[in-house]
């Protein structure tokens, strides 16, 4: 038998299937009519096929006889051969046990025990039997032994040889299967260990990323706050210079001061966006709900951006075709969200282009706005009423593949150093978070070369 890897060695009990092995023992017992037992090195029985003989039953009826038989069986169980040579032990009735070591991987892995059987020429009643008890009937035992089939030493050797050959095949096949299983388990353990290590690395990286994001947000907030204070002074002094508080200015000087103020306003909006986004990322976004007239918020925002529209040479129009009831909103955040959308629309509109802001109610099922169908001709239940504020331009438009990316922070579709339109790429990210904080969503429809329509859908919730 080939010697297999010792690191994968196993006991007989670990590699043998108990049920199948007992069936093999039963088949050999049926074939040779000789009881057999197979033990591992710990003395545990792995398989057996035995029955009680009449002489043994008779002797065990006597306390001394039972003690002698029990002692012999105990010695046989403990006796582990050092090699595969046959050895024998006889009981007080003259019945014999033959013991042989089971060699596996050049080592003794267990033992095969045949018996008790009546060997040829050994039918006798030993002297020890007569000393058991005065009532002990040696003649009866002799008659019982006469009824037993005798087995020669040659037959025992053949049985042992055949049994060991079968065991060799069974053990070799079982051990190969065991090794395959152990190697698979070892491989799975290694894979699991590697996966666990990678998971720990990913968790560490995730924690590092969280810490990095926190530090980044704190840095942005700190820097933005420190920039905002002097910038406010610059804008304020520019206003005073433009109004002539420090003395009259010439036309060219007024243009320079106006440019300073305009650029200052743009920079202040950028810093405000960074501050807003840092609050969102750090979870410090506080909502201040108020019952307001949506028309007033939209009209005020449109009016505040008319000057920007004039500078861009575009037209900014407001369209409200229906009465909109008061709703609970955070007016500051809705104003900022709408302001970002208007600025983007003006930025990407051609000179003379139109940017249209609309306000309406959607979602209510009515005769002129039926509910949506489910695709099988059945009208679905209407959704709750929602406030829609939309901004539509007729400019460059956005490709289908870019419509999801535009809401990511610091994303500019034109990342070249010479890009035409400036900005931090935070505006739409802020819009998305502000609208979602209201429980709403931002929807975009766009075609390249035809323009874009951004719609804020905010559910109307009774917060009273």
Image (spheres, rainbow, N blue to C red):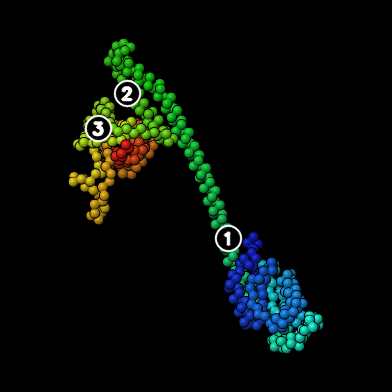
Cα separation between marks 3 and 2: 27 Å
Q: Which residue is mark 3?
A: 295
- Counting residues from the start of the chain, the first of labels 3 and 2 encountered is 2
Q: Which residue is mark 1?
A: 183
- The answer to whether residue 121 shows anywhere in this view is no
Question: Quadrant of residue 434 in the image?
Answer: top left
Question: Would you call the spot at circle 2 few (<14 residues within 10 Å), some (14-19), or many (20 or more)?
Answer: some
Question: Would you call the spot at circle 1 few (<14 residues within 10 Å), some (14-19), or many (20 or more)?
Answer: few
Q: Which residue is mark 2?
A: 262
Q: Position of residue 45 (x, y in %)?
A: 66, 71
- Counting residues from the start of the chain, the first of labels 2 and 1 encountered is 1
Asked if the residue under mark 2 is in contact with the one under mark 3, i.e. CB atoms within 8 Å, the reply is: no
Cα separation between marks 3 and 1: 73 Å
Question: Would you call the spot at circle 3 few (<14 residues within 10 Å), some (14-19), or many (20 or more)?
Answer: some
- Counting residues from the start of the chain, the first of labels 3 and 1 encountered is 1
Q: Which mark is residue 316?
A: none
Residue occupying the point 37% across, 19% down: 234
- The answer to whether residue 389 shows anywhere in this view is yes
Nearer the observer: mark 3 or 2; the answer is 3
Residue 142 against residue 17 in the figure, above or below? below
Nearer the observer: mark 3 or 1; the answer is 3
Q: Residue furthest front?
A: 135
Residue occupying the point 76% across, 88% down: 139
Q: Position of residue 173 (x, y in %)?
A: 59, 70
Residue 111 against residue 93 in the figure, above or below? above
Q: Position of residue 437 (x, y in %)?
A: 36, 38
Cα separation between marks 2 and 1: 73 Å
């Amino acid at each position: 038998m080939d010697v297999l890897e010792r690191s994968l060695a196993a006991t007989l009990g670990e590699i043998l299937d108990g049920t199948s092995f007992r069936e093999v023992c039963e088949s050999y017992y049926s074939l040779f009519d000789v009881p057999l037992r197979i033990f591992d090195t710990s003395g545990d029985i792995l398989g057996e096929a035995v029955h009680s003989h009449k002489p043994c039953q008779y002797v065990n009826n006597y306390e001394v006889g039972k003690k002698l038989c029990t002692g012999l069986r105990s010695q046989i169980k403990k006796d582990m051969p050092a090699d595969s040579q046959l050895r024998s032990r006889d009981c007080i009735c003259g019945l014999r046990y033959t013991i042989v070591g089971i060699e596996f991987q050049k080592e003794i892995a267990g033992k095969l025990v045949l018996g008790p059987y009546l060997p040829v020429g050994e039918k006798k009643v030993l002297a020890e039997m007569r000393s058991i008890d005065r009532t002990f009937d040696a003649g009866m035992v002799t008659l019982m032994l006469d009824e037993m089939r005798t087995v020669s030493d040659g037959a025992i050797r053949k049985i042992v040889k055949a049994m060991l050959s079968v065991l060799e095949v069974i053990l070799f096949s079982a051990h190969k299967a065991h090794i395959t299983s152990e190697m698979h388990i070892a491989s799975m353990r290694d894979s699991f260990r590697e996966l666990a290590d990678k998971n720990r690395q990913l968790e560490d990286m995730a924690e590092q990323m969280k810490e990095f994001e926190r530090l980044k947000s704190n840095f942005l907030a700190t820097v933005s706050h420190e920039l905002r204070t002097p910038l406010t002074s610059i804008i304020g002094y520019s206003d005073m210079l433009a109004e002539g508080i420090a003395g009259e200015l010439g036309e060219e000087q007024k243009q320079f001061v106006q440019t300073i103020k305009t650029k200052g306003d743009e920079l202040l909006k950028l810093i405000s966006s960074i501050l807003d986004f840092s609050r969102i990322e750090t979870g410090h976004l506080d909502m201040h709900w108020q019952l307001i007239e949506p028309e007033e918020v939209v009209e005020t925002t449109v009016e505040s951006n008319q000057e920007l529209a004039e500078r861009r040479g575009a037209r900014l129009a407001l369209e409200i075709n229906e009465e909109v009831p008061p709703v609970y909103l955070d007016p500051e955040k809705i104003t900022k969200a709408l302001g970002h959308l208007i600025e983007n629309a003006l930025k990407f509109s051609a000179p003379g282009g139109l940017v249209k802001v609309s306000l309406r109610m959607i979602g209510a099922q009515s005769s002129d706005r039926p509910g949506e169908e489910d695709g099988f001709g059945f009208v679905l239940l209407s959704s709750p009423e929602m406030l829609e504020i939309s901004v539509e331009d007729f400019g460059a438009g956005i490709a289908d593949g870019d419509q999801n990316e535009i809401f990511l922070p610091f994303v500019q579709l034109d990342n070249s150093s010479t890009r035409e339109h400036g900005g931090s790429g935070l505006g739409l990210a802020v819009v998305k978070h502000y609208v979602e904080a209201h429980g709403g969503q931002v929807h975009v429809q766009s075609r390249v070369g035809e323009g874009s329509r951004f719609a804020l859908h905010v559910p109307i919730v009774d917060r009273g």
